[in-house]
Image (spheres, coloured by chain):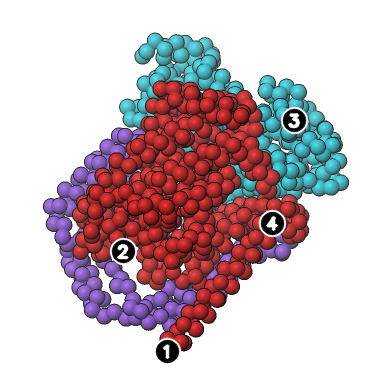
């Protein structure tokens, strides 16, 4: 009852004309920023931050949140159309979205992504409304051991994201873990593999890895592929409405993706990229259509989009209730509140219930606005593919350059993107997939940090990983998952061999 | 400049006629990974692995390095058995896109965003012969103006549009 | 000059008294770039944005904030040191690139003193020592006794960060040996503290206001020269007989070789802004205390912190390259 009263009050707040306007501005700006590769929600939020000094705190928060989840909507557009993720978290959407576009189903993929984002957003909103205090408590019970266990689970899941050879998939995850060690060791302060370059002390930015491996690498591949006009084959512009069968196929993935996304969003640090990867990996194990994953399955677009959008909503839980920002964008949210003298923390839900419920209700309104905004735009986006590639790719290269440069206003980041871009192209030649590497790269530093912190706090006793209940359960779960997937892989191999023998 | 491109194009044609199976190329990828992992193992040992009780700075690089080394050996074995056709490398695009990023990185803080973007577009569009020089220049101009308007005008990012003119 | 600027001028002049009188106001036709050593969103970034906003609205000096995070602020400092000293590039400096880095890193691409013109001191915030309220520790003496008997873990906001240096200062002043557990920023440290896995931590006072009021964390002592108006009941280390003063300072600097007149104008403009009521209120909320200093005094202050912190940084054994 308290929740319904709170929510309806929030709805009144969110429906005030000025909040509605700021919500609209936020989601629109977010969508377009999200489309631009490399420029994420952070740049857009930083840009509107001074503007929020003059706004009511609720309006400010509603607008910033709009940018944040609007960018997740927009991020998938470039992934689907050009295999270039607008935001790192939409990298996973490339895996099935781009093949769909190549098959002339770009409109359907964009529609599916919009619907899945909406579904995920709604799930995230409900979770936040109903479970915020519980999830905040859960996050509080997560010490280093628990984090380590969750990350381990995420890694095992990530190895399954790959659609090529499983060995290469695992190799890429491990390579990502290894590359994640570049930079200052946060436990001792010693530099690792920085070659004396100060910019490398803080490690390589996730945006650079994503833009290099996916964006630049893909561009090099596609110039020749598109010289013959291959990317504009058989597009049916009118057709973007999914078939009945496709609608039905999307429901379960959206629900599962939304659930998984909500969980990872609520844990500060793991974020949308991991949420979408884990959701995709789980779906690949469960979906009846798993054989088509990687070749343009509509479920493969729906699941990561649902997951990363629900994660963007629940990411506000630790930010607002614990004051722990999971990402740079969330740190900006805290900054915007600090300007108004609001300190995020356990008392925010009580002291500023207007703000909290107004925000939750704005998720509903913002996601509806996004749907209204995005569905008519699908036709326009798909038409983008009609622009001859010779005009398009130099423009994209420039957008990537500016986007990467704008992260730290440092040209070194552009050089680094070049290195990762070349590496990304070579990886494609050698048939390695970039997605598992990206996940390993996100999780590696966190995994090492939590592992070593747990050991410091337990004063060298590794037993804590099993004796603390949450981490114990998670680790057992991970081991079961690992053994199960190895066994099923072996069984599949045996079956293939037997089939081959009988065919001979 | 055009002569450099024609050299690349000729190289390209030579590559296109001969298509080896994936095996040797794939194995090369595994070898590169192996080399990378050895580098991290060696570097990690230099940094100190510490003890199980108190893990050192190099412990994690060494552990992941060893895992990657083993996996890359498996990858090499797998790829050597692969008899499918190799992908055709497109070294011209590889070089041009790389050069475009280099040009952007070296120009944006010296001459400003607009001229930097103009040069980047020209370089990036080099490998596509279907776009004539006039088209390349025009495209460069339009994208430069667009970036100026979008990033400096609309988004207010702290870049200089022109510098040192 | 607008009427408001004129009022500000009178205010500033009254405030500064003895300082040589320059006129606060715009000093360049170009927009001024205020380089911040952190990503957007933190207190430092917000101060820069407030300055930029007031430069423009009150004095007609256009200004933009340029976030160049990385390597403990040394990337930003290096960038600024290389720019033209015409007053169009300034850095919102702090202890990381100017006080800690010179000792922490063997080779620094810039000289923290000769490479810069230190213009104006903005203020400092106060860090404190916090312990779990359930540990039966009520005073600093209890803390020392507990630490000597059981050993104690403390969370800092990172290796070589101000809170780590403070931990070291406490170790040597109190004659104890704490177990250092570094985090990336103070928020995750506080999270682990609340999860009960961390026994103590060091952090700025203002950010912990709610936790202190709710009794979830117990501040034992401040590392400031005097008590804080936020919580006047918390004693300082100095009062308790231990000389531990480590303040988190912020100031405005530019590249070396700036024209003295420009320096004076910027200095006076900043002082005028720091005296405006909304700014005073905002800074008080963030727990930042401003003291008026001339440019010479500020330069001396920066040089002084390098010297006084050096032994602490060395004992923290943060081996940078």
Rendered image quadrant of residue C54: top left
Choose between A128 and B14: the one closer to the eye.
A128
Q: Are callouts 3 and 1 both on one chain?
A: no
Sort mark 1 into few (<14), some (14-19) or many (20+) by Cα contacts within 10 Å: few
Q: Secondary structure at mark 4?
A: helix
| Real-space CA distance between mark 1 and mark 2, rounded to the nearest whole angstrom | 38 Å
> Which numbered disc, 4 or 2, marks the residue that appears first in the sequence?
2
Reading the chain from its start, which is encountered first: label 1 or label 4?
4
Structural crowding at the residue carrying mark 3, measured as other residues with C-alpha within 10 Å and reported as few (<14), some (14–19) or many (≥20): few
* Circle 4/circle 2 CB separation < 8 Å: no
Evaluate whether residue A173 shows in this view.
no
Residue B159 is tagged as: none
What percent of the width, then of the height, locates residue A378?
30, 45
Q: Position of residue A269 (x, y in %)?
A: 56, 47
Q: Colour of chain B?
A: purple
Residue C225 located left or right of residue A339? right
Q: Which residue is mark 3?
A: C215
Query: What chain is tagged by disc 1?
Result: A
Q: Which residue lies at the image location 76% right of the left edge and 56% below the top edge?
A: A467
Q: CA distance from mark 3 to mark 1?
A: 76 Å
Q: CA distance from mark 3 to mark 4?
A: 32 Å
Residue A473, labelled with which disc? 4
Q: Are marks 1 and 2 on the same chain?
A: yes
User: What colour has chain C?
Assistant: cyan
Given residues A117 and C224, the one toward you in this image is A117
Of the two numbered discs 1 and 2 in the rendering, the one whose residue sits closer to the viewer:
1
SS at mark 2 in the image: helix
């Amino acid at each position: 009852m308290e929740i319904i009263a709170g929510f309806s009050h929030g709805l009144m707040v969110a429906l005030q004309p000025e909040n509605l306007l700021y919500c609209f501005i936020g989601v629109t700006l977010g969508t377009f920023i999200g489309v631009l590769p490399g420029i994420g929600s952070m740049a857009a939020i930083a840009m509107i931050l001074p503007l929020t000094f003059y706004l009511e705190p609720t309006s400010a928060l509603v607008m910033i949140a709009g940018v944040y989840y609007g960018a997740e909507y927009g991020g998938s557009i470039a992934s689907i159309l050009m295999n270039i993720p607008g935001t790192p978290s939409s990298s996973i959407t490339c895996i099935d979205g781009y093949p769909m576009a190549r098959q002339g189903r770009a409109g359907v993929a964009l529609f599916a992504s919009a619907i899945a984002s909406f579904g995920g957003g709604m799930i995230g909103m409900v979770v936040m409304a109903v479970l915020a205090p519980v999830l905040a408590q859960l996050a509080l019970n997560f010490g280093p051991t628990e984090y380590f266990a969750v990350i381990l689970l995420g890694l095992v899941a990530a190895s399954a994201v790959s659609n090529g050879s499983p060995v290469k998939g695992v190799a890429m995850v491990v390579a990502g873990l290894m590359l994640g060690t570049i930079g200052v060791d946060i436990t001792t302060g010693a530099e690792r593999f920085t070659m004396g370059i100060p910019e490398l002390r803080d490690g390589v930015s996730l945006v650079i890895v994503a833009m290099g491996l996916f964006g630049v690498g893909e561009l090099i591949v596609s110039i020749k592929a598109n010289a013959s006009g291959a990317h504009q084959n058989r597009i049916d512009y009118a057709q973007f409405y999914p078939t009945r069968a496709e609608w039905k196929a999307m429901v379960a993935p959206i629900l599962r993706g939304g659930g998984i996304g909500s969980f990872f969003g609520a844990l500060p640090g793991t974020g949308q990229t991991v949420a979408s990867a884990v959701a995709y990996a789980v779906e690949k194990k469960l979906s009846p259509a798993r054989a088509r994953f990687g070749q343009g399955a509509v479920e493969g677009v729906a699941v990561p989009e649902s997951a990363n959008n629900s994660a963007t909503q629940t990411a506000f839980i630790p930010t607002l209730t614990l004051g722990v920002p999971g990402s740079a964008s969330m740190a900006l949210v805290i900054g915007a509140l600090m300007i108004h003298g609001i300190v995020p923390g356990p008392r925010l839900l009580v002291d500023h219930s207007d703000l909290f419920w107004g925000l939750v209700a704005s998720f509903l309104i913002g996601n509806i606005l996004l749907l209204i905004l995005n569905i008519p735009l699908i036709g326009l986006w798909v038409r983008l593919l009609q622009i001859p590639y010779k005009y398009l790719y130099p423009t994209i290269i420039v957008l990537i350059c500016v986007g990467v440069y704008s992260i730290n206003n440092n040209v070194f980041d552009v050089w680094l993107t070049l290195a990762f871009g070349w590496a990304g192209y070579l990886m494609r030649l050698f048939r390695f997939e970039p997605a598992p590497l990206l996940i390993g790269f996100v999780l590696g530093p966190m995994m090492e940090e939590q592992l070593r912190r747990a050991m410091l706090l337990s004063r060298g006793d590794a037993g804590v990983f099993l004796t603390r209940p949450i981490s114990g359960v998670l680790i057992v779960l991970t081991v079961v998952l690992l053994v199960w997937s190895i066994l099923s892989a072996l069984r599949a191999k045996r079956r293939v061999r037997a089939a081959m023998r009988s065919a001979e | 400049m055009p002569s450099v491109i024609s050299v690349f194009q000729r190289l390209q044609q030579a590559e296109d006629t001969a298509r080896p199976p994936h095996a040797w190329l794939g194995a090369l990828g595994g070898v590169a990974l192996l080399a990378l992992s050895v580098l991290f193992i060696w570097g990690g040992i230099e940094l100190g692995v510490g003890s199980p009780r108190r893990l050192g700075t190099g412990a994690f690089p060494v552990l992941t390095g060893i895992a990657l080394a083993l996996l890359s050996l498996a990858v090499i074995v797998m790829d050597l058995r692969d008899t499918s056709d190799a992908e055709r490398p497109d070294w011209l695009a590889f070089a041009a896109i790389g050069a475009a990023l280099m040009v952007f990185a070296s120009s944006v803080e010296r001459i400003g965003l607009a001229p930097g973007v103009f040069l980047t577009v020209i370089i990036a569009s080099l490998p596509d012969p279907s776009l004539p020089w006039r088209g390349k220049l025009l495209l460069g101009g339009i994208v430069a103006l667009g970036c100026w308007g979008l990033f400096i005008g609309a988004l207010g990012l702290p870049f200089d549009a022109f510098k040192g003119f | 000059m607008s009427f408001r600027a004129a009022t500000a001028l009178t205010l500033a002049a009254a405030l500064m008294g003895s300082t040589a009188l320059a006129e606060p106001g715009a000093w360049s036709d170009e927009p001024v770039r205020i380089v911040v050593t952190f990503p957007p969103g933190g207190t430092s970034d917000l101060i820069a944005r407030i300055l930029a906003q007031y430069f423009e609205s009150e004095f007609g000096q256009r200004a933009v904030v340029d976030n160049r995070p990385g390597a403990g602020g040394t990337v930003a400092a290096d960038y600024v040191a290389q720019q033209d000293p015409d007053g169009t590039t300034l850095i919102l400096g702090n202890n990381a690139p100017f006080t800690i880095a010179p000792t922490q890193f063997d080779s620094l691409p810039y000289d923290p003193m000769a490479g810069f013109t230190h213009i104006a001191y903005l203020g400092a915030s106060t860090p404190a020592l916090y312990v779990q309220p359930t540990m039966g520790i009520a005073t600093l003496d209890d803390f020392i006794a507990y630490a000597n008997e059981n050993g104690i873990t403390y969370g800092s906001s990172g290796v070589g960060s101000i809170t780590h240096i403070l931990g070291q200062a406490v170790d040597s002043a109190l004659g104890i040996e704490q177990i250092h557990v570094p985090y990336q920023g103070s928020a995750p440290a506080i999270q682990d503290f609340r999860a009960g896995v961390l026994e103590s931590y060091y952090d700025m006072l203002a950010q912990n206001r709610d936790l202190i009021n709710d009794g979830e964390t117990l501040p034992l002592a401040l590392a400031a020269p005097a008590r804080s108006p936020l919580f006047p009941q918390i004693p300082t280390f100095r009062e308790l007989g231990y000389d531990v003063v480590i303040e988190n300072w912020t100031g405005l600097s530019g590249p070396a070789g700036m024209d003295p007149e420009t320096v004076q104008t910027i200095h006076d403009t900043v002082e005028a802004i720091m005296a405006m009521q909304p700014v005073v209120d905002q800074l008080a909320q963030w727990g930042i205390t401003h003291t008026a200093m001339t440019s010479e005094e500020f330069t001396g202050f920066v040089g002084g912190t390098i010297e006084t912190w050096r032994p602490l940084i060395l004992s923290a054994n943060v081996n940078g390259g």
